[in-house]
Image (cartoon, rainbow, N blue to C red):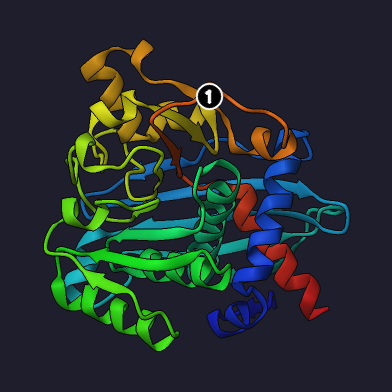
Amino acid sequence: MIPTIDEATVARILTPAVTRDLMRSTLRARAGGAAHGPTRAVLQLSQGWFATMPATVALDDLRGLGAKLVTAFPKNVGDGLPTHQAIVAMFDPGTGAPIALVAGETITERRTAAVSLVATERLAQRPRGTLAVLGAGAQAHAHLDAFLAAGLVERLQLWSPRFERAEALAAKARASGLAAVVVAGDPAAAVHGADVIVTATAASTPLFEACDVADGAHLNAVGSCVPSRRELPAALVAEANVYVDSLDGAWREAGDLILAAHDLGHARVRVCAELGTMLSDPERSDPVARVTIFESLGLGIEDVACAAYVLAQLG
């Protein structure tokens, strides 16, 4: 019988610090050709979507072969259920035999937050300072955990369309010892003056105007992973150096970029490089733009690397 690794076990092993280092190594491996997989295959459903994300990774001390199977049902939030639910099916890289099913929700949350953190450390002009988080769901909590663990948050500005959830996230931040925490009344107020911004919402239209974002800010755009939805205004995208996890995936799925290109013309959207390329070349710098954006879609290599790490720790 194929063993199943539960969420509690994954959460115990895959700490924010471990995940940050693992994601940095995995994205570098992608840039070097040692980690790869196709763009996710998505089956559209009336309730949401179902996707498969196969991948293989070969790090210095870790190998993995597998696929994440994930559903996104946005209306689950009204029933108190996760909007994203997943498992990672793992196989022996040498024989192809199935070896484990690893719970995927914690992996999805923590690897996404870790990649945003790695992007911020590499791309942001001011990685430490005021963090704005828009949204208060699982991804918002994971991002807060990751950025607090890295010691990058001096002040926190929060907004969610559900005020009580933003207050709960604020209470969590205060309980961690952070004193400067503000719950804003609208997205524009939340991003005002922020050094780093995380958008992790289910928005289908821009959350704020370009002029609401400070010069030199860095944005991690997490919530828009379908072509018809966006969190960022086209004018802000046009002012930015944009970085992505996958160039192919970005132009297939990232509504922030696809809709900005539709509004303003493809030439106005300046996608500079994949994040893995930037991590592999720490000396590289691009012409300065008013802001930087990391457009996060998520890659199967990230999930498979996390699941392989968990299995390796379990022996």
Left of 43 or right of it: where is 304? right
Q: Residue at x 21, y 42 (%)?
A: 212
The foreground one among 126 and 234 is 126
Q: Residue at x 41, y 79 (%)?
A: 178
**Residue 194 in the image: above or below residue 184:** above
From the image, tell me which residue sits under label 1.
272
Q: Position of residue 129 (x, y in %)?
A: 44, 59
Residue type at mark 1: give it: Cys
Judged from the image, the secondary structure of the residue bearing numbered disc 1 is strand
**Residue 256 in the image: above or below residue 105:** above
Q: Residue at x 42, y 38 (%)?
A: 293
What quarter of the picture does the N terminus occupy? Answer: bottom right
**Residue 158 in the image: above or below residue 195:** below
Left of 25 or right of it: where is 76? left
Q: Position of residue 226 (x, y in %)?
A: 32, 39
How dense is the environment of label 1, judged by Cα within 10 Å: few (below 14), some, or many (20 and up)? some
Q: Position of residue 175 (x, y in %)?
A: 39, 88
Q: Residue at x 83, y 58 (%)?
A: 62
Left of 197 or right of it: where is 262? left
Image quadrant in which you'd find residue 85? bottom left
Q: Position of residue 219 (x, y in %)?
A: 39, 45
**Residue 266 in the image: above or below residue 70:** above
Left of 303 or right of it: where is 244? left
The foreground one among 269 and 138 is 269
What quarter of the picture does the C terminus occupy? Answer: bottom right
